[in-house]
Image: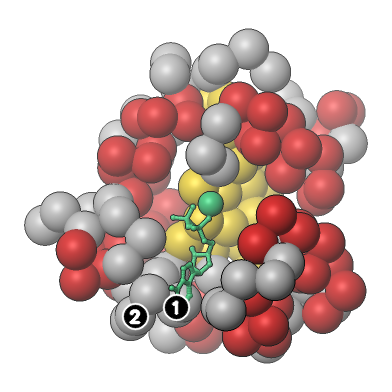
Amino acid sequence: MTGNRTFTMVKPSAFSQGYTGQMLAMIENAGFRIKAMKKTRLSEEQAGCFYEMHRGKPFYNDLVAFMSSGPIVSAVLEKENAVESFRTFIGATDPAKAEPGTIRKLFGKNMRENAIHGSDSDESAMRESGFFFAATDLF
Ligand code: IDP
Ligand code: MG
C-alpha cells in the first residue's frame, strides 16, 4: 500500500443499530472505493491484538470487550491520500467533538462507541488490512 489505501471497521454499536448501509453509502459517495469487505466478529483475543498499541491505557479493557461484543464490517478502501482523507471524513475520536456531517458525529454514541474505525497511518492501514484480508482479497 502506497498512500492510497486505508482500513475501516463499522463498529458493533453502529452495526447493531442498522447504520452499516448508510455509512457505506456515505463512504462511497465521498469517493472511497471498496477494495475488500466482510462482515465478521472479533474474539476478545483478536480485538486485544488489533488494539495492541493501546494495551495498558484506561480504556483498553472496555474497548476490547466492546469490539468483540457483536458483528462488525471490515473493509479496505482506496482513494488518493486515503488515510488522512478518511480520518477527516469520519471526524474526531469523540463524537461530541467531531465536525458536523462526519460519520462519528452522525452515528457515534460516545467516545468508545464512536461508530467507525479509520487507520492512523499507511503502516497501520497495511497492518490492519492484513489482519482481515489476504492480498488476493483486494481487487
Ligand atoms: P481513533 O479510533 O480515533 O484512532 P484511538 O485513540 O486510536 O482513536 O483509540 C482507539 C479507540 O479506542 C477509539 O476509536 C475509541 O473507540 C476508543 N477510545 C479511545 N479513547 C477513549 C477514551 O478516552 N474512552 C473510551 N474509549 C476510548
Ligand atoms: Mg487509532
Q: CA distance from mark 1 to mark 2?
A: 5 Å
Q: For residue 94, what is the image quadrant?
A: bottom left
Q: For residue 95, what is the image quadrant?
A: bottom left
Position in image of residue 12 (x %, y %): 57, 78
Label 1 with label 2: CB-CB less than 8 Å: yes
Question: Which of the image's four quarters has the N terminus?
Answer: top right
Pointer 2 residue: 110
Q: Nearer the viewer, residue 31 or 98?
A: 98
Position in image of residue 60 (x %, y %): 64, 75
Q: Residue at x 72, y 67 (%)?
A: 55
In the shown orientation, is residue 112 left or right of residue 68? left
Q: Nearer the viewer, residue 116 or 65?
A: 65
Q: Residue furthest top?
A: 2
Identify the element where label 2 is drawn. Answer: loop
Identify the element where label 1 is drawn. Answer: loop
Q: Residue at x 72, y 44 (%)?
A: 128
Does the numbered disc 1 mark a residue whose Cβ is under 8 Å from ligand 1?
Answer: yes
Question: Which of the image's four quarters has the C terminus?
Answer: top right
Q: Is residue 80 above or below residue 21?
A: above
